[in-house]
Image (spheres, rainbow, N blue to C red):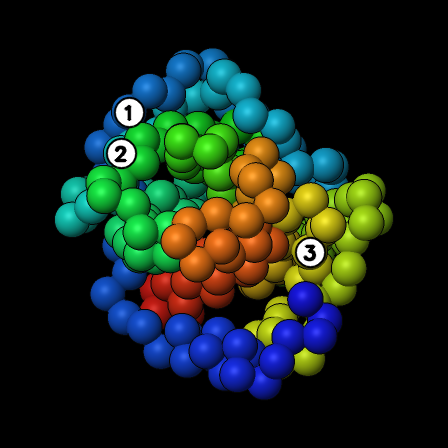
Amino acid sequence: MTNRTPLLASLALSTLLLSGCAAAAGSVGTEPAPSSDVSSPAPAPSRGPSSSTQGGHAGHHGGDSPSPRAASKGPSEAATMVCGEQPMDRLTAILDLEQDPHTVNSWADSTFTCTYHLDEGALEISVREAPDQAEALMYFDAMQALAVDATPIEGLANLGFPAYETADGSAVFQKDSFVLRVDASDLPDTLGPDAITRNALAYQLSTTILACWVEHH
């Protein structure tokens, strides 16, 4: 990611001009379990049973969304956007899917996770919500230190935020009190009719979500 072309960086920057981002709505396939508010840096949580939240299949066309709140009360509206209309539309367009993939949402340990079930495997997008920006950066730094083959995303490609990618197909960004992780490691090396790499897919979905957050604020 550090050697991205100026064209790709420009496309990423232009993505930040998007508007109309929507949070997830509905509920599909989540498994209940007690949630907790863990504020100290720790590795990103793996998929597993956790408390259900708003957000389900595609999350299209609105519905009431939680407003910013203490992490123990559920995810913020901004966090649920990872299962919203824009990431879904971007994913289906890149992979030329005939229909939206099934999604499952969860909320645990201050982390909202949306898993997209594709034919090729699972794509997991998660948002860790910290009490403030400083703690989010601590968590990001801890994740980067623990990640295998982590490479900083630098220059225009990081859009001005701390960011890194991993060789197995993950992209991680820190913005404000959020740490965004798009994990495509369960997918093949290339996907879709244009044979996009899983790293490029993770990056493009990350910039789409960051654009939603810019619009939201």
The residue carrying mark 3 is 165
Which residue does the image show at 75% across and 64% down from the upper left? 152
Q: Nearer the viewer, residue 41 or 167?
A: 167
Left/right of residue 58 with respect to residue 49 in the rendered view:
left
The residue carrying mark 1 is 28
The quarter of the image holding the C terminus is: bottom left
Q: Nearer the viewer, residue 63 or 204?
A: 204
> Does residue 129 appear in this view?
no
Is residue 85 depicted above or below 175 in this figure? Answer: above
The answer to whether the residues at label 1 and label 2 have Cβ atoms under 8 Å apart is yes
**Disc 1 from disc 2: Cα separation:** 6 Å
Q: Which secondary structure, mark 3?
A: strand
The quarter of the image holding the N terminus is: bottom right
Left/right of residue 41 with respect to residue 196 in the rendered view:
right
Mark 3 vs 2, N-terminal side: 2
* Residue 110 image position (x, y, % from top left): 55, 36
Q: What amino acid is found at the position of numbered circle 3 in the picture?
A: Glu
Q: Which secondary structure, mark 1?
A: loop
Left/right of residue 133 with respect to residue 42 in the rendered view:
left
Q: What amino acid is found at the position of numbered circle 1 in the picture?
A: Val
Disc marking residue 57: 2
